[in-house]
Every structure is written in structure tokens, then in C-alpha cells.
Image: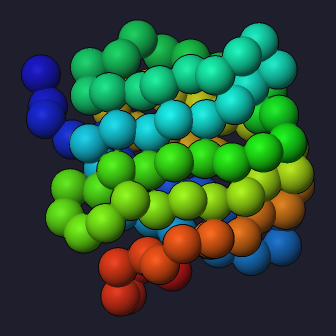
Amino acid sequence: MANELEVEIVAADHFVWSGAAKMVKARTSDGEIGILPGHSPVLAILAEGGLAIEPVSGSRIEVSVDGGFFSVDNNRVVIVADNAKVTSDAPAGTR
């Protein structure tokens, strides 16, 4: 089992963030979901609100999204949002 997630966040018209993470939390249409390495595959509809990412190094990253979808498979998390914006500082070179 891998000990990190590969995370990529894109909006409809721009790249938002990518990097290695220990955990991702998001709000879906079915409620809040937390993803750790080794999580089973998931495909969910994102609800409007915030995402929280605990990167492998650096401080917590928060992203505001206006909906979209959330996919998890083989320790890879892909978030495609209608619109998204980093609301806290992301480590340099990852935006």
C-alpha cells in the first residue's frame, strides 16, 4: 500500500493545483468524504464548498469549488471543478 496520494485539481478553464498528499477531504452531494492512501475507488459529484488537502510537505491547502466531480482510483485523486480557487497558500511551484 502506498503512503501518499497523487492529487490533481483542475477547473473547467484552468489548472488549479497538483501534488502529493497524505489526505484529501471534500464535500460531495452525499456528504463529506475523506480520502487516505489505499482508499477504494470512488466517483462522486462535488457539492459547492471547500476542499482540504494535507500535502506530504508544507501546510494545509484549502480550495473553494463551485461543483464538479471527484474521482479516486489507485491512490490518484482527480478533482474536476466547474470553478475552483486556492483559498490558502499552496507550496511554491504547485499552482
In percent of width and height, residue 48 lies at: 85, 42
Q: Compared to 57, does 8 lie above or below? A: above
Q: Nearer the viewer, residue 59 or 21?
A: 59
Give residue 68's quadrant in the image.
top right
Q: Quadrant of the N terminus?
A: top left
Q: How is the image coloured?
A: rainbow
Give residue 5's quadrant in the image.
top left
Residue at image coords 14%, 31%? 2
Is residue 68 among what the camera can see?
A: no
Q: Compared to 6, does 70 lie above or below? A: above
Counting every numbered tag in the picture gives: 0
Residue at image coords 77%, 34%? 46
In percent of width and height, residue 74 lies at: 34, 27
Q: Does 3 sit left or right of 68 as displayed?
A: left
Q: Does 80 sit left or right of 74 as displayed?
A: right
Q: Does 54 sit left or right of 67 as displayed?
A: left
